[in-house]
Amino acid sequence: MRIDIITVVPELLKSPFSASIVKRAIDKQLVEIHLHNLRDYSNNNYKQVDDYQFGGGAGMVLMIEPIDKCISKLKKERNYDEIIYMSPDGETFNQKTANNLSLKENIIILCGHYKGVDQRVRDHFITKEISVGDFVLSGGELAAAVVCDAVVRLIPGVLGNETSALTDSFQDNLLAPPIYTRPANYKGWKVPDVLVSGHTQKIETWREEQALQHTKKTRPDLLNNL
């Protein structure tokens, strides 16, 4: 899988991709993540990529020309399954979207900045708009890092135990059940007996029941999708 990220501040994305699961995926050559500095596609001597909005109003807007040049260059080199714009008014990112994106071969992620991007970019280049929540960040970089992390860990071979991702919260519209590790008794706080019973079927039944109870209590809205 290849992910190309277009950004005004690539420095923000170097750290998230240089450690942990994503770095291991890159080292295993299971994923390529390439950062493209939008300023490299500016015709302006000052590397300007933003301008005032027509009609007046506060906030600068990313111009269409450098974005067009960057996306067009990438599209000449390969075909892309999705061109994603990180935007607070996009569809809310969830596990289903992460699962779908993990099956793609090549995607572009455009990070908004300042007030956003020229609407013509969204009209003519973008195939999907994604939000990580009902709030506004300074730019789309951190949101893009969240999407990449969620997607990359689903690629076969990335996690040491591939079944681990299948038991995560939201995979079946349920939250994950409680989990425990050693010691079985700490300060009188004991692990549920069923988990140390060695009875696989009883353990799975307990986990299913706990997941359902946890979801009912914390996120009952998820049960509407079952």
Image (cartoon, rainbow, N blue to C red):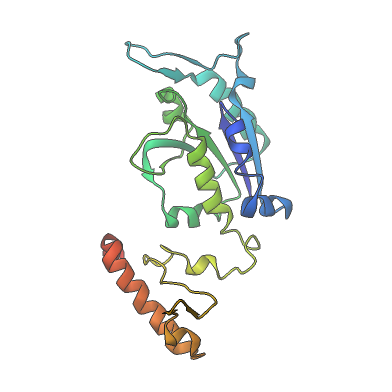
Q: Residue at x 50, y 47 (%)?
A: 147
In the rendering, at what x and y percent does residue 217 appear?
27, 66
Examine the image and state in which quarter residue 129 appears. Answer: top left
Q: Is residue 29 visible?
A: yes
Seen from this angle, which residue lies furthest top?
45
226 left or right of 141? left
In the rendering, at what x and y percent does residue 48 appear?
56, 14
Q: Is residue 83 visible?
A: no
Camera-nearest residue between 79 and 152: 152
Quarter holding the C terminus? bottom left
117 left or right of 40? left
Q: Is residue 50 above or below residue 139?
A: above
Q: How many marks?
A: 0
Q: Residue at x 43, y 64 (%)?
A: 169
Camera-nearest residue between 197 and 86: 197
Q: Is residue 140 above or below residue 94?
A: above
175 left or right of 67? left
Examine the image and state in which quarter residue 188 appears. Answer: bottom left
In the rendering, at what x and y percent does residue 95 appear?
44, 57
Q: Residue at x 66, y 63 (%)?
A: 157
In the rendering, at what x and y percent does residue 166 appear?
50, 68
